[in-house]
Image (cartoon, rainbow, N blue to C red):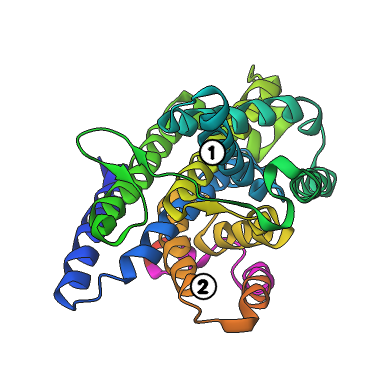
Amino acid sequence: MRRYLPVAALAAAVVVIQLAVSALKAEYLLTQLTMSAYYTLVTLGLCLLMGYAGQVSLGHAGFFAIGGYTASVLSTAGAAVIGFAPWMSLPAGVAAAAVVALVIGVPVLRLRGHYLAMATLAFGFIVSRVILGTALLGQADGISDVPAVKLFAGLVLSGRRPLRVQNYYAAWALVTLGLLLAVNLLGSRVGRALRAIHGNEEAAAAMGVDVGRYKLGVFVLSAIYAGLGGACLAHFNGGIGPGEAGVMKSVRYVALVAAGGMGSPGAAVAVSAVLTFLSLRGVFGLYDDAVFGALLVAIMLFAPEGVVNLLPARRRP
């Protein structure tokens, strides 16, 4: 049961933060907190890929953008032309990210180390260029007027002021469920196989682990996390822009995973939530990208296993 402590801690923190914000009459903070949750989904998926499958991806902003743009196009142009129901754009965005990850994952995951990083970086560039060059995707202006989505039990995915609290809880419920899925996955036979692959691919293959299948599976799963975050954020914000596919966005996600600890999904979620919220509040100002770049360098130099391993209880004897 100890492995579920991060999930319980996250659920408790979500409730405490909302109550504290309401008590301080600062409900406006819930907007950035909700957005932080959707970005944290990307970090959580990337934590599984990097921390357990040992695969470095510099293109996950591309999957986030694919999910967001697919949902936006289908709920705007698709709704006008073929009567596409807006709520169906969410699973469509997730499916699009998963399919693209499956298609590029087969050849790309044959690479290792910096070759893999370069290949995923190239993928991110391709997605960014396609967005900027495609009129349907709004080019440099992005897509606006993305409608709110009515889900179930009166839940509406929207950034409107009266819906702040319910959207805050809905967003962080997704992150909590995502963390629960990750914890269960890592505690299963799949998790043991991923750890073996991370340790030594040749040794894992010699022990009967289907290395290619597991690496591709976790790559697609991480893309699903990113695509879901992108689709939800597009509807919450009422639009999406090409900046979501930028290379620095991908670097930021890698920095957040490294800072939290590649082998600790709970810590990655906590670090991502805090730093992303500060970034969205404009705390870092014009030095925003520089802060995350410097963070990545500092972590690699001084805490390569993440800040969580600096805690006395986590230090190895």
Query: Badge 1 is on which residue?
Result: 76
Amino acid type at image mark 2: Ser
Q: Which quadrant, please, contains the N terminus?
A: top left
Residue 317 at least partly seen: no
Question: In the shown orientation, is residue 60 left or right of residue 115?
Answer: left
Instruction: Give the x, y percent position of residue 97.
Output: 61, 33
Q: Vertical placement of 253 versus 276: above or below?
A: above
Quarter residue 187 falls in? top left
* Secondary element at tag 1: helix
Asked if residue 16 is among those painted magenta in the image, a careful observer would answer no
Horizontally, residue 184 falls left or right of residue 22, namely: right
Task: Name the residue located 55 percent from the left edge and 32 percent from the top edge.
Answer: 74
- Give coordinates of residue 64: x percent, y percent: 59, 45
Circle 1 Cα neighbour tier, 10 Å, few/some/many (<14 / 14–19 / ≥20): many
Q: Quadrant of residue 82 in the image?
A: top right
**What residue do we see at 49% from left, 70% from top?**
280
- Which of the labelled discs sits on residue 100, or is there none? none
Tell me, yes or no, whether the highlighted magenta stretch contains residue 304.
yes
Give the residue at x 69% y 30%. Answer: 100
The answer to whether residue 232 is above or below residue 18 is above
Mark 2 is surrounded, within 10 Å at the Cα level, by few (under 14), some (14 to 19) or many (20 or more) other residues, namely some
For badge 1, the amino acid type reads Thr
Numbered-mark total: 2
What range of the chain is rendered magenta? 296-312
Element assignment for label 2 = helix
Tell me which secondary structure the magenta stretch mostly adopts. Answer: helix
Residue 279 tag number: 2
Lower position in the chain sequence, tag 2 or tag 1: 1
Horizontal placement of 112 versus 55: left or right? right
Does the image show residue 47? Answer: yes
**Which picture quadrant has residue 226?**
top right
Residue in the picture at 42% in, 62% down: 273
